[in-house]
Image (cartoon, helix red, strand yellow):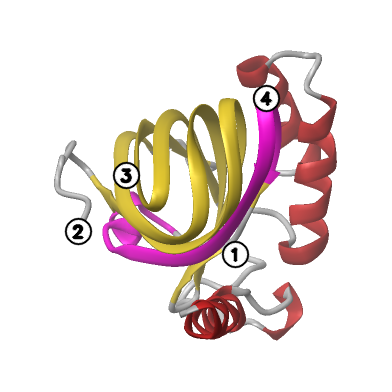
Amino acid sequence: MNKLLTACLALALFAAVPLPATAQTTSSVSKAERETFTTEEVLDVGHSFFGKTTRGLANAVEYVFQRQGEPSAYIVGEEAAGSFVGGLRYGEGTIYYKNGIKQRIYWQGPSVGFDFGANGSRSLVLIYNSDSPEDLYTRFGGVEGSAYVVGGVGVNFQAKDQIILAPIRTGVGARLGANVGYLKYSSRPNWNPF
């Protein structure tokens, strides 16, 4: 069972890790034409949402920008998650595009892995290669690892076709482990994680 779980985690990690920004394909709108957010704009949003004392936020944002470049949109929201081998995550927030589009968005999804605990998080999700919220109304697979008691900051990547999401979470709770799962984004709340 451990070998099967390890193989599944390794395969999911390989499949979910996005390519560097220079190797990715783009949608019908070229990157030069797409309006994007700068590091400073994202950090300003993050500090106003998470608070000025979140030093780990700056490190996480810098890491994502080094891997993917400037995002075309971002989500700020809150979520709750829990796991005992199998887990669930539910969240809601607002998505912002540089061109002024702003809309409520919801997400939910299951996970499985060596993962135990529960947490409540504030989330800043950086979005790449998307021009409207409708691009996100699908499932995005990813791998996540957590190790904290009381609080922490974490980042992971989720991908579907050319669209890449980079959720940055700062949470309160107790969580330890790694899991494979997906999040399903929608315009309305839904209790069904599948």
- Under tag 2, what secondary structure? loop
Q: Quadrant for residue 48, please give it.
A: top right
Within-10-Å neighbours for mark 4: few <14, some 14–19, many 20+: some
Q: Position of residue 174 (x, y in %)?
A: 58, 30
Q: Residue at x 81, y 15 (%)?
A: 53
Q: Position of residue 168 (x, y in %)?
A: 62, 42
First in sequence, mark 1 or 4: give its number: 1
Within-10-Å neighbours for mark 3: few <14, some 14–19, many 20+: many
* Of labels 1 and 3, the one closer to you: 3
Numbered range of the magenta stretch? 131-154
* Of labels 3 and 4, the one closer to you: 4
**Compared to 44, does 134 lie above or below?**
below
Q: Quadrant for residue 31, please give it.
A: bottom right
Amino acid of disc 2: Phe
- Under tag 4, what secondary structure? strand
Q: Position of residue 193 (x, y in %)?
A: 22, 51
Of residues 65 and 98, the one drawn nearer to the viewer in this rendering: 65
Can you identify the residue that label 3 sits on? 107
Can you identify the residue that label 2 sits on? 194
- Under tag 3, what secondary structure? strand
Is residue 133 in the magenta section? yes
Q: Is 106 left, or right, of 162 in this rendering?
A: left
Q: CA distance from mark 1 to mark 3?
A: 29 Å
First in sequence, mark 1 or 3: give its number: 1
Q: Residue at x 76, y 44 (%)?
A: 61
* Of labels 2 and 1, the one closer to you: 2
Q: CA distance from mark 2 to mark 1?
A: 35 Å
Q: Which mark is residue 151?
A: 4
Can you identify the residue that label 1 sits on? 33
First in sequence, mark 2 or 4: give its number: 4
